[in-house]
Structures are given as structure tokens and as C-alpha cells.
Image: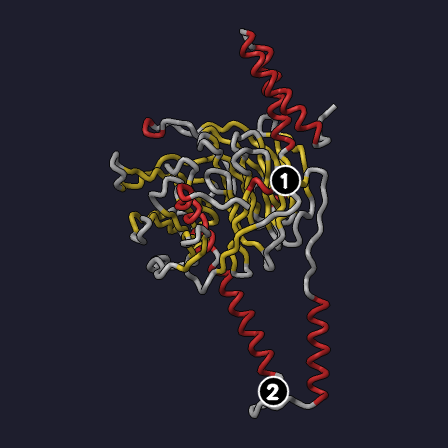
Amino acid sequence: MELPQMPELMGLSLLVGLLALVATAAVARGWLRAEEETSSRTAGQKPNGLPLDKSLRSKKQKQQQRNRKEKPQQHNFTHRLLAAALKSHSGNISCMDFSSNGKYLATCADDRTVRIWSTKDFQQREHRSMRANVELDHATLMTKREDGGYTFTATPEDFPKKHKAPVINIGIADTGKFIMTASSDTAILIWNLKGQVLSTINTNQMNNTHAAISPCSRFVASCGFTPDVKVWEVCFGKKGDFQEVVRAFELKGHSAAVHFFAFSNDSRRMASVSKDGTWKLWDTDVEYKKQQDPYLLRTGRFEEASTIPCRLALSPDAQVLALASGSSIYLYNTRRGEKEECFEHVHGECITDLSFDITGRLLASCGDRAVRLFHNAPGHRAVVEEMQGLLKRASNESTRQRLQQQLTQAQEALKSLGALKK
């Protein structure tokens, strides 16, 4: 596996740090397991160190055998659009994130590890990764050794405790200018990288269920008990100094609590899914300072959202919407609002994270001990539809040739996946 070069070191370190911070809950569970193992070992001895009688030992052995039999097996899943499965974690994966340059995927699990995967290996038979152990609840950074290799070291300090409720989301701006943390009450904090709070936001949404930074690093958004998504702009001066956080706009139109939302890669589109059983696609490329509101582009039905919490991911070009409910995934064409693919029982547990890579060709999901990667066939179909429409209106030959080339590439990709509609 090709190791990252030094210019990419800072971005990758931030990515690892983010995943390690989110691993706090997983770490706690790991320590509990360690305590249980210690208790089990000491339970087999008397105070003087001698073994217990044979009957108790036999009972203990039977219990251990029963526990081994009850140990959950790796969930198996197959589908014609399954591109790969990443299976190095020994615990359930709680979150993942692609680096902003698209070269790496970071995963964090309750086995108290963070792993870094090279995306160029996804199409290979073997998927190698770099592993970092999460010690206690300290974030982890990557440094270069004298021999040219890389190692992970723990940071000496934590950020000060400012939240009054459990932290549910952490985000690092791609610009590296600030960190966002959101808790389960109504608080969102904006920090600098030294751990100083720059601003505190009260969302007034009864409770927060999700918060995120936009890919452009300009906005912070949240959703919760109320039927809207609120968006703020984090403003910096020309010299990079923090100025203020101001309300930008809101996504209004749902009639019940919003489960989740996501940005497109250019932050000009947003999608949301609500307990009212609908998903919505929005045009957020507006001049909010002139009181211009986002435009609703499409509303689709997703009945599963009315009964259980859901997650979603929006493809970089906003052409495909992925919705996760329980352990299943559904893909929708956002232009027509139609469901095109369904992957059922993808993981042995409920899906904990869902994300497209920056090319939009792959969709990643996690929920058990594996990350599963799917070919984005609906995305290729959307390109075919778009290119066919543009070809009819093309006015010169050079434009037609360029559009025809993109159309042919998308059709060939669908053909190779066996997903070309007749």
C-alpha cells in the first residue's frame, strides 16, 4: 500500500483525529470488556491462588463453550452491485469518513481502533489498511519516523469539557480553520484547532439528532425534533481570523421531525429525510443575505422513515440519493424521484454510517464489522439520461463529441455491471 506523502499529512491527521474522537463510546465499551475478562480470570481462583473445585471448573468451561457458540458470526452479503467488503475490524464499525482528496477512507470501531484504507485498493482482491489503536479517550495523530515510515502517537491533551450533554457529532472543516461539535441537547460549539471555543450556537430544536459541516467549509447545519433543517455561516476575515457565526437559511417543508440531512459535494444542493415519511431535495445556491430562501426541487416518499430513524447520503452531483433504514439501503434518482435499487440486509446490525466517495462511483456503508462498497449504477443511469438530453440540444460538433464520449463511458460502465436497462 502506498503511504501518504508529507503534503497530505495534515489532512490525513485531521481525518484520523476526527475518527478517534468519535471513538470515545467504543473505547468505553472496550474497557468494560477488559474488566469483564479480568473478572473472569480472577473468578477461577481462591484468594490463595489455588483453583476452585472441579465441579465449578466444569461449570465454567461449559459456560465458556456456550459463549463461544453464541459469538456472532461475520454477516455474509452478496449482490451484483457489491464492489468490495473491507473486513479488518474485530468490532462493529461506528463511523467512517473519506478524506477530502478522495484517496483514503478512515473507519472507527468499538474494537478501539481507527483504520486508514487506500481507496485505490478497493478494486483489488486484498484490502490493506493502516491501524491505529485508540488509547483511553485521547485523539491520535500520525507522524513520520526517521526511517521514512509512519507511526501513530497520542495527543497529550483533550479539549476542555464544554458540552452539558453527550456529543453526537464531530466535524472538521476541510479548510482546517475550525472544528464543530454537537451534543444531544441543543448546543453546537465552534472550536479552533487549539481547543478554544469560538462560538456557541443554540439550535432551539428541542434536541439535536444530527449536525454537519458543509463540504465547502462555509456552513454548519443541524436537525432535530423540529420539522426543519437550520443552517449557519461560519465567517472568517480575509486574513483567516474568525469573525462570527450568523444564521444563513432554513429548509422548511417537512411536517415532522427531520432524521437526517446531507450536502452535495459543491454545497449547492441539500437533501433531508423526515419522520413524515418523505425525503426532499433542495437548491441551496441562494443569496440568503438578500432574504432568498432555498428552492424545493423534489419530494419523494419513503415510508420507512415514518417508523424508524433513517440516514441518507447525497451523491456529489446530487443525482442519486441513498437512504438507509435498519440494515437495508435504497437508491433514488433525484431527478425523477424514483427508487432504482434496493440492497436488503446489507449488515448484521443497523447501518451506522453511509457515504459516497468523491467520484460518486461508489457508495460505502457500515453497520457491523465490515464496510461494504457498492457500484453506483443509478448514478451512471442519471449521466446517460442527462447526456442524451444535452445531445439533442447541442449546437456544435465539438460539444456533441464531448457529450457522446461521456454517454458512451456511462453506458459501458452500466454494461460491465449488468445494469444497463433495455
Q: Which residue lies furthest to the top in this view?
A: 396
* Circle 1 crowding by C-alpha within 10 Å: few under 14, some 14–19, many from 20: few
Q: Mark 2 falls on what kind of element?
A: loop
* Circle 2 crowding by C-alpha within 10 Å: few under 14, some 14–19, many from 20: some
The one nearer the camera, 363 or 219, is 363
Q: Which mark is residue 215?
A: none
Taking the spot 52% from the left edge, 35% from the top edge, the residue there is: 358
Taking the spot 59% from the left edge, 80% from the top edge, the residue there is: 41
Occupied quadrant, residue 58: bottom right
Q: Mark 1 points at which residue?
A: 123
Q: Mark 1 falls on what kind of element?
A: loop
The one nearer the camera, 122 or 83, is 122
Disc with the residue nearer the chain's start (2 vs 1): 2
From the viewer's perspective, tell me whether residue 250 is left or right of residue 319. left
Taking the spot 29% from the left edge, 48% from the top edge, the residue there is: 198
In the image, residue 212 lies at what x, y percent?
44, 44
* As drawn, 422 above or below 35: above
